[in-house]
Amino acid sequence: MTEFKTYLQAGYPALYVQTLEPARAIETMSQQVLKAQGHPYVWDIQSGVINQSTGEKVADQADPNAAVQWIADAPENAVLFVWNFHHFLPSIEIIQAVQNGLDLWKSKGQCLAVVAPKVQIPVELERVFTLIDFALPDQEALDRILSDVASSASLPVPEQADKILDAAMGLTAFEAENAFALSVLDPEPFSCKVIASQKAQMVKKNASIEILTSTDRFESLGGLEQLKTFALQIAPSPLARGLLLLGVPGCGKSHFAKALGGELGVPTLSLDFGRLFGSLVGQSEERVRQALAVADAMAPCVLMIDEIDKGLSGVASSNQSDGGVGSRIFGAFLTWLNDHESRVFVVATTNNISQLPAEFLRAERWDGLFFVDLPTIGERETILKIHAREYGIALSDLPDMSAWSGAEIKSLCRIAAMTRSTLKEAARYVVPLSRSMGEKLKTLRDWAMSRTLPASSPVSMPAPPERKRKMARRIIDN
Ligand SMILES: Nc1ncnc2c1ncn2[C@@H]1O[C@H](COP(=O)(O)OP(=O)(O)OP(=O)(O)O)[C@@H](O)[C@H]1O
Ligand SMILES: [Mg+2]
């Protein structure tokens, strides 16, 4: 991404810096302004305009509109950083002041730099401001903070500093300093656990994302060997993006997504697309960006987006149905999926392809598009063993379970346990879904056949029907 100082050199008159650390951002960027022979000024509603290099108050303007107009009187190459200005931008006075000022600022190498935690630009100014992200502290910056905290606590810098810095990646400088300070008080100073729990706070503050505490593992998921092997192979790679699992209901997609983090030894986050639809237009894209930024900060992690069709349904017709909010959320997600460099491995699940936009299903978006079908005979046996053991059921007197899903086999075992009956008796209470959704299942399979990989290991084709013997028997019967 192009950096602040490049835009400065190129003479951009209006920048919008998105950051959760306005003070650190202004401090860092002011240094860059000085290096480029410019003059940094800062405005906030309490202090008016302050000259950053001298600390001197140069204008008493508490009024945001007067602050913008002040730029015309500022020296050439002045940059005015305006703090919390997203609250004022939507007013007509400010919109007009910015529009009227632009040409003059450009001719004098001046710049208005809005510094705000979120992007909230009125439509009149959307094309005027250039958006810049101010990155969170890198390892080096965190290392300095760690040394400062250690020296204030009169402790040596911990030996495993690298691990601690890794754990703190994604925190703001303020949060990292707090987390380090808190970890000093732990019986084991500078413990990564304390820092990780501080990070978990970030997730808790975000309504559309949560940390899963599921204890599901692969050993309690029968079959799906090809999917399991592939995921374990690629997920640790920095190049990995994620998997899209399409499949028949109740066949272990969600279970797989929840278990993968545990298998890889990283946390699993769950993102609810449905909750991302805010009531205010514009707010939703912001929410998806914030949620994905939290996931980035939690990396390495698995990000599960369960039943993604529920959130994205209607995206194709979104312009009519919701003013385009759906397609913008979706666009923001796809951009992130393509571009993110953090080690966030996405596992999205769906059993309804018809609602998903075609771009989403293009294979190169994902590392793999897998189809999770009803379990094979061998897989059914494994699944039955898993759940019979879980519920303490004897494996005798088995019912016919062809075309049953994993969920139905599990439910059979649970019913047998509750009714204290054999599996065959309990089978009366289970109506397999495949019976009622035969046609739907066929459409799904046909679609998946040429476009997806099977989650189960390829099975050898069933033996051809034994015609000869039947004919022989028929002859005998006759
Ligand atoms: N292959 C399997 N091995 C063991 N248990 C399974 C298997 N498939 C499904 N189950 C069990 O069935 C229940 C439902 O599975 P899960 O929620 O993962 O299905 P799903 O594919 O996500 O279904 P849906 O499409 O309806 O969301 C879970 O408790 C899970 O443990
Ligand atoms: Mg599911």
Image (cartoon, rainbow, N blue to C red):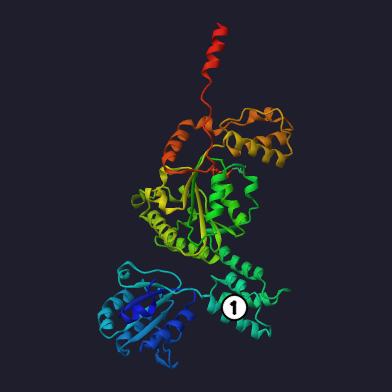
Assess mark 1: CB under 8 A from ligand 2? no
Image location (x, y in percent) of residue 28: 45, 82
Quadrant of the image containing the N terminus: bottom left
Query: Ligand 1 is found in which quarter of the picture?
Result: top right
Residue at which label 1 appears:
177
Image-quadrant location for residue 179: bottom right
The answer to whether one can see residue 408 in this image is no
Q: Secondary structure at mark 1?
A: helix
The one of 72 and 106 positioned closer to us in this rendering: 106
392 horizontally vs 104: left or right:
right
Quadrant of the image containing the C terminus: top right
59 horizontally vs 345: left or right:
left
Image location (x, y in percent) of residue 405: 57, 36
The one of 60 and 76 positioned closer to us in this rendering: 76
Give neighbour class at mark 1: few <14, some 14-19, many 20+ (Cα, 10 Å). some
The one of 291 and 68 positioned closer to us in this rendering: 291
The answer to whether one can see residue 269 in this image is yes
Image location (x, y in percent) of residue 363: 41, 49
| Residue sticking out furthest to the top | 478
323 horizontally vs 471: left or right:
left
Q: Residue at 51% of width from left, 75% of height from top?
A: 138
- Tally of numbered discs: 1
* Picture layout, residue 435 above or below residue 25: above
Q: Amino acid at mark 1?
A: Glu
Image location (x, y in percent) of residue 319: 34, 52
The one of 230 and 134 positioned closer to us in this rendering: 230
